[in-house]
Image (spheres, rainbow, N blue to C red):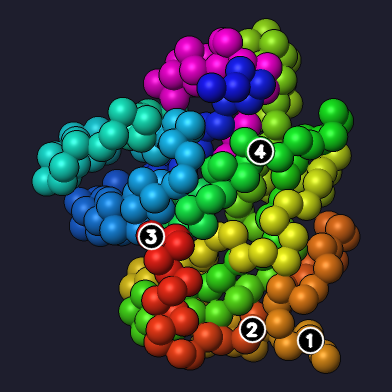
Amino acid sequence: MSKEKKLVVEMLFNNWGATADRLTKGWIEYRIDLFMKYALQSLLLQSSQDFTCYLLYDPNSEKLIQETLKKYPPLPSNIRFVTPKDYQAHVIQDIREFRYLYRVYLSSDDMYHKDFIKKLHDYTPRKDTVALIPQYGYIYDSVQHRLGKFFFWLPSYGATLIRVDEYLRGQAARTSWRDAFKVPREFINIKEPIWINHIHGQNTGTTFDNVLTWKIANVHDACSLDPWDNGKQPRAFFGPEITEPNEIERILKNFF
């Protein structure tokens, strides 16, 4: 195991207030079931298991979280639900013997390609790089079973890189994927769909019909676009939709 980098996959489960019902039994049961069916399967499928994943939950939902988790097989030791306070304590223990902490971002209902973690381990960024940005992926609607290529200039995926010595001294900047265009950055997995943005029955973000309209004149394939390095001007493109059932299944098998 390399001691150069420690990969920590960070999922914000319900520890933030964007969703009004995030502390309710129905919401928690639905979202944990989604995690088990999709994001967890993606993590278990990773060709490199050299990572730790933490799902951060609101301490006020502790009882409901634990009761719901008991309905499923135990999680592997490198994947766990934690409170934000416990998360910080775990990370400090995880990274002590490493040079860099890679904060890897994934929503609890989304997926990475099975080789994403391995590719992060194999990739050598420039010394000043703080953010690694993968702008190419898929949109998958699991209700309608529809899939298409997708380009997004500032995706909620990828990683930010932190020096462990600075983190342990409390001097590390708290950058996340949202800050990727504010810091030295590199684009990774260029023209390679590496993540799935998952649309399901209770999304609050968008719908498949909405993304069908995200077009750019004279562009036909999201993965033909060059990386977009202008954080002040959004750029997104959907297409083409993949309609052949066997091709859909072939692609999805690489993600979960």
Q: Nearer the viewer, mark 4 or mark 1?
A: 4
Q: Position of residue 115 (x, y in %)?
A: 53, 50
Question: Which residue position holds label 3?
Answer: 256
> How far is mark 4 from mark 3, CA to CA?
22 Å
**Residue at the spot 44% in from the left edge and 25% down from the top edge:** 87
Q: Which mark is residue 219?
A: 1
Identify residue type, mark 4: Asp
Can residue 85 be spotted in the picture?
Answer: no
Residue where numbered disc 2 is placed: 239
Q: How far is mark 4 from mark 1, CA to CA?
A: 31 Å
User: In the rendered structure, which amino acid carries the disc numbered 3?
Assistant: Phe
Above or below 248: residue 35:
above
Is residue 131 in the magenta section?
Answer: no
Q: Distance between the residues labelled 3 and 1?
A: 29 Å
Give the number of the mark in front: 4 or 2.
Answer: 4
Amino acid type, label 2: Gly
Q: In this view, does 48 lie to the left or right of 160?
A: left
Quadrant of res 182: top right
Q: Residue 122 carries which label?
A: 4
Task: Return the disc, 3 or 2, that comes first in the chain's sequence.
Answer: 2
Callout 3 secondary element: loop
Nearer the N terminus, badge 4 or badge 2?
4
Q: What stretch is highlighted in magenta?
A: 85-104
Residue drawn at point x = 65 percent, y = 80 percent: 238
